[in-house]
Amino acid sequence: MTAAARLSIALMHYPVLDKNRDVVASAVTNLDIHDIARSARTFGLSRYYIVTPVQEQQKLVEKIRLHWIEGWGATYNPKRKAALELLQTENSLDDALSDIERRTGKRAKIIVTGAAGRANSVSFSGMLELFEAEPDQPFLLLLGTGWGLTEEIFDRSDYVLEPISGGGDYNHLSVRSAAAIMLDRLFGR
């Protein structure tokens, strides 16, 4: 099984920070649903989780998912169907981890990301080496929304992936752009 097939990605809508550094649940966006699913399918990932405890947000995600995998959208755009088949909504990070363990028989190692970076960050090439060193190990890459992941999430992680840097002092990519860049750096040719 390829390293990409052992990686799942989770878009965390809770717990995340707002601009005042308060812990909040952020809103799900239609663009993130579609674009990250397309990137996940393009690079051969196992699953794409949207993590939110907000029931109305979960219903919205499921309505969109079903439209594209069972509804009119499935016949209108089969490629979108293939991407959204990877999508799964979970209440919490623990629920996503439980799903991976149920499917693989192993606890996933958690990789977190953040625009600011950390002293213990692993480079993209270093992360690939870790994937190759553990050929049966599932991994879960967490992406933050709002103003980023909470310290609690960083404390639970096994690895912190280096931030994406454009070379200047402006570093405010959309999460869907960051996801595509990260996946390309890890698995692109």
Image: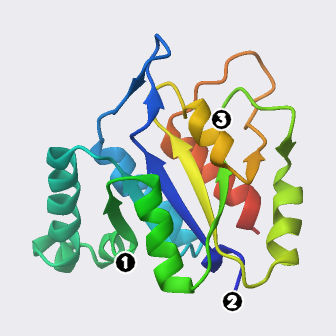
As shown in the figure, which amino acid type bears the numbered disc 3?
Gly
As shown in the figure, which amino acid type bears the numbered disc 2?
Met
Q: Residue at horizontal 72%, vertical 67%? A: 187
Q: Residue at horizontal 56%, vertical 72%? A: 45
Q: Which residue is mark 1?
A: 82
Q: CA distance from mark 3 to mark 1?
A: 28 Å
Q: Residue at horizontal 30%, vertical 75%? A: 81
Secondary-structure class at tag 1: helix
Upstream in sequence: badge 1 or badge 2 = 2
Q: Which residue is mark 3?
A: 114
| Rendered location of residue 84, percent (x, y) | 34, 69
Other residues around mark 2 within 10 Å, as few (<14) / some (14–19) / many (≥20): few
Q: Which residue is mark 2?
A: 1
Q: Is residue 39 above or below residue 167?
A: below
| Rendered location of residue 121, percent (x, y) | 83, 41
Secondary-structure class at tag 3: loop
As shown in the figure, which amino acid type bears the numbered disc 1?
Ala
